Every structure is written in structure tokens, then in C-alpha cells.
Amino acid sequence: MSLELFSLLSILIAVAIGFWKNINVGIIALVFALFIGHYLGNIPINTIIAYWPMRLFFTTVGVTLLFSIARLNGTLENLSRLMIYQSRGRKALIPIIFFVLALVLASIGPGNISTSALLLPIGLMIAASTGISILMMSGLIILGSIAGGLSPIAPNGIVALELARTHGVGELGYAIYLTNVFAITLFASGMFIVLGGLKLNGQRVETVKPERFNRLQLLTLASIFFLVVWVVLTGINVGFAAFVMAFFLFLFKAADEGEAIIGIPWGTLILICGTAVLISVTDAVGGVALLTDFLASLMGPRTAVPILAVLSGVFSIFSSAVGVVMPTLIPTTVSLSDALGGSASPALLTTTIAVGSHITTTSPFSTMGALALASAPKWVDRKKLFRDLFILAFVAVVFIALLGMIGGLGYFVD
């Protein structure tokens, strides 16, 4: 077996071992990176260490620290309750409000996992007590979180843009985010209708007025607002800006510093960065070029986008979109575009991978699908919910492939 092929297979082996033994895939990836890169590929150890994506790591730590503070002091929970109150008891609006709330919250910084973790317990309890479909509410919260999760200032969006920048695709700005919001909103709308959302129209439920924001929560909201304005107007690194906001919030004792630091998703960071190191080693020994040639042999000018959407979606059902799928496939897009004669731009292929790999994360094998299962009230049939979330993920694969086939993933891409 060639080193190029072995390096590619090592990614799949790392994912399989992680799934089987419940070990962080990033740690396994670092072990493979050492043996494949240094002992088989003769890459200096310092070079392998330099593959650690420091900018990505720095940015994600800053953003997640800020929103760990917002979670600890109740700002995010109170904001969600306020949004629910705005339904004025109209039952059909409650799932829609949760979708929009998830989209907005994920977009402004916490990202998809933190947003889902916050909203799923609240949303599923409300759904169970008011007769709203548990699958509908789970799907809308997850999809809303995913729709906002590729924002340029959210962790997954930061990863996607940094991968594009690092591997020669260029600056994609808001292209991935807008395409993602467009595609997922379409899919979520169809799901809402199919699962009986329109039948809820005219039905009402009782709502409770939320507590007023306290001084520290208002200060936290102001910090988040200032962060967004600062990043948009000046282009400052969002991680650096988030560290500054966190510093000022700690000055005012907005949350316990130790608990806020513990709240950073260190396991996810190791997963993302460790996998990125292995992908870089794979690229250095020729594995990415081998994968590019293989993908190019499967695709033609008209089939590249739908095939890539299906591959991204199916891979993501069983592995991490941000930790495995995007870092594996995005590095191939420039070479793949060249092999296709430029009929599909690297930007379009990158956007397809990002959106395709995220729309299927209702899968119960994903973090958010698992959160939905864990957050469901005790009397909910979890086996049925597991099956339904799994089916929903595969329906999403079909949807994103069809959308790609008709050109729907290229509306916001230059």
C-alpha cells in the first residue's frame, strides 16, 4: 500500500477507533500524524507541530470563552425565554420562533453546539407539554443552530473560512453563511409543513413573562453587540475582540472566570485541531492529491456539486462536519476545480462541502442529534426519535443534492 493511500485511510481509521473506543478523534489523529508524517514521511517533528492551526485555535477559544460567560450568567437563557414570550401563545409560532432564535443566537457567536445545548432542553419540554411534534421541534432547533453556525464569527464558520483561506480558495466573506441559511431555511420550511406545522395554526398555549435582564446580563448583551459591530466595521480578528470583551466582563464579575474557562469546549478544539494536523500531514505526503484525482474521476462539470454534496452529507452523518469532513474535503477544492476545467469554482465546491456536511447533523450520531435525544423528556420514545432523526439526516442528503443539481448552492458565490 502506498503512503498516500495509507495516509488517507488513517483518517477513516482514526474516526472508526474514536467511535468504537469513545476516544477523542483529535488525539488519535495526532498519533497517526506523528507516525505517518515523521517515521514514514520523514517530516521533521517541529514541522508537524507547526501544522497545529493556531489562528483557528486562538479565535475559537476567544469566541467560546465570551459565550461561556453569557451562558453562565443566564443571558442566553433569558434571551431565549423572551423570544418565546413573543409568540403570545400562538402554538404554530413557537417552533418557528425557536428556529429563528437558534439561527440568531448561533450567528452572533456561540455557534451551533452551544445554541442547541441551550435551546433543546427548553424547546423539547415545551413541545412535549403543548402537543408539538418532538421531531419537529428537535429538527428546527438543530437546523436553526446549523443555519447560524456557519456565520463568519461563529466557531464552525471560522473553521470553514480559515480552511478556505489556508488552502488557496481565498476570502469567501459571507458566501458560505448566506448559502447555508438559504438552503437550511428551505429544508426546515418543508420539514415544518410535512410534520404538521400548519395544522397548529389557530391553536394557543399559555406563556409566562420572562424576568427582566439584570445589570450583568445587559452588560453581556452590550458586549456581544459591540463585538459584532467591531468585527464588521474594522475586520479585527473575532477571537481577539472576544478576549477583550471577556476581559471587561470579568472586571465586572459577570461570571466566574474558572467556570467560564471550563465551559470552553476543549474536547471539540482538540478534535478539530488534531484532525487538521493529520490532514496537513496527509497533504504533505500526497494523500490529498490522490483523493482529488479520485473525486475528479467520479465527477463531471454538471455532477460535481451534487456528488460532493452527497459525499459531504453522508460522511457527516457518521462523523464530525467541522472536525473531519471539512478539513478532509476542502483542501481538495482548488485542484478539483482545475481538474474539472474550472466549470465549478473552488468557492462553489467549498461552499457545497460546508453546507452539505452541516445540513445532516440531525443525525443521532452527531453531537446535536445526541443532544436532542438526551434533552427529550423521559416519557418520549427515544428509540423512535433516534430512528426519525436518522431518517431526517438522509432526507437532508437528498434535498441538498437536488438543490446543488439545480444550481441553488451557487446563488451567493461569486
Image: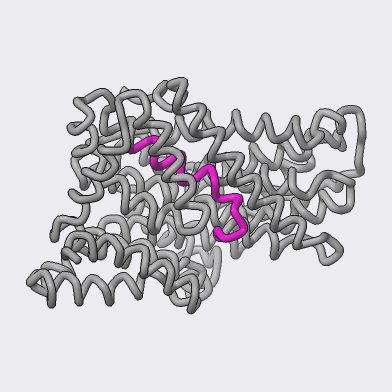
Report whether 194 appears left or right of 51.
right
State which quarter of the image contains the C terminus: top left
Q: How many marks?
A: 0
Report whether 120 appears left or right of 210.
left
Q: Give the residues in magenta.
A: 350-366
Q: Residue 128 placed where, x, y %? A: 85, 53
Q: Residue 156 placed where, x, y %? A: 42, 50
Name the colour scheme: one colour
| Residue 185 covered by magenta stretch | no
Q: Is residue 268 above or below residue 163?
A: below
Q: Residue 196 placed where, x, y %? A: 81, 34
State which quarter of the image contains the N terminus: bottom left
| Residue 365 covered by magenta stretch | yes
Report whether 164 appears left or right of 89.
left
Q: Which residue corresponds to the image point at 50% horizontal and 51% vertical from the top-left?
A: 111
Which is more toward the observer, 232 or 28? 28
Which is more toward the observer, 163 or 256? 163
Q: Residue 81 placed where, x, y %? A: 74, 48
Q: Which residue corresponds to the image point at 30% horizontal and 28% vertical from the top-left?
A: 300
Q: Which residue corresponds to the image point at 56% horizontal and 48% vertical from the top-left?
A: 221
Q: Is residue 341 above or below residue 257?
A: above
